[in-house]
Image (spheres, rainbow, N blue to C red):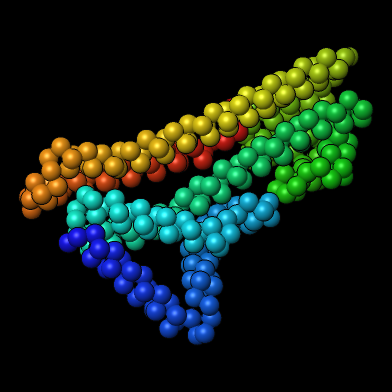
Amino acid sequence: MNFVTFLVFGIIGFILVYVFAYRSSNGEKVYKYISRQASVVTDKYAPYSYNEIRKKVKELGQDYSKKQYTFQVAIFSVASLVITYLYFYNIIISVIYMFIAILTIPYLAYLRYKRIYSEFVFEQIQVYTTNTIMEFATTQSFVKSLEGVYESGVLEDPVKSDVKTMIDLAYANGTIDESIAFMNSKYDYFIVRNMHQLFLQITNEGAKNSADALENMSLDIDMLVENVYRDRMDRAQFHKKFLQFGIVLYLMIMLVQFLLGVESYIKMLDTWYVQILLHGVVIINTLFLLNGEKYYNENVGAE
């Protein structure tokens, strides 16, 4: 099957999907119908945490637009069709891989949401710790410091709501122990635990001069934040090189065909173990890329 025939089948498949969506959309624009149906499925089956993260990313204005998602689907479709056709010279297998590639897009979107949300939360934690230390230097009271930070309007949910919970717990229990335990469990960051430990020590044991300790804590926070942002830049550079490397791995099949000759390669495809080997190469390369994406998008802001 030549490339022109392959392209014709691909166009026919796209038209069939479009017609099916159009007939089921009751006059609604097709792309809106597909988008709405995808949202219904996501809201029904996605975990609550995912829905909350996606909502926050939209509030931050960092979610992809419908055009961007459509472009992403088109890129994944064309790339998977072309690459797998070069492997198997079989339109049916290529179409199957195309749909599998499209199905990975929600997972990649989820990883991206997690990264953006994690970056946002870390920035909020930076604001929380820095401003609480500044407030404490004036009030010399941990609860009053929390109230000052909460009322200043520098925090956003979910951190803002959790600070309010800390304040309520402190007044309800008469101590800050449960408030600190609550916040430490919600945000397991080095700077949060250390700052809370310092305030707990000052509050329970007293301190004649806490200014130096607070100053050192502020310097530690600044240093940690600098390291985290540097790590983000390093990750971004690594991510670009990683994707380039992954694409080259897929296209190594072109080198094999160049060395063997296209006709000899196509004859080899009649052998069942060659087919299995090629499927294995595609699957292993894909898992390699997905694991790399998972690494890039997770543990942002971790110490």
Q: In front here: 33 or 145?
A: 33
Q: Is residue 276 left or right of residue 197?
A: left
Res 160 seen here: yes
Residue 104 falls in which quadrant of the image?
A: bottom left
Residue at x 29%, y 42% (from the top left corner): 251
Q: Is residue 128 left or right of residue 8?
A: right
Residue at x 33%, y 38% (from the top left corner): 248
- Furthest-front residue in view? 4
- Furthest-right residue in view? 138
Residue at x 57%, y 55% (from the top left corner): 64
Work out whether 208 lies above or below 300: above
Work out whether 140 lies above or below 13: above
Q: In front here: 30 or 63?
A: 30
Residue 74: give x, y in percent of width and height.
43, 59
Residue 29: give x, y in percent of width and height.
53, 77
Residue 209: give x, y in percent of width and height.
87, 14
Res 56 seen here: no
- Quadrant assignment for the C terminus: top right
Q: In front here: 136 or 200?
A: 136
Work out whether 12 lies above or below 258: below
Give the total of numbered labels: 0
Q: Is residue 48 left or right of residue 208?
A: left
- Quadrant assignment for the N terminus: bottom left
Residue 79: give x, y in percent of width and height.
35, 53
Residue 167 falls in which quadrant of the image?
A: top right
Q: In front here: 290 or 194?
A: 290
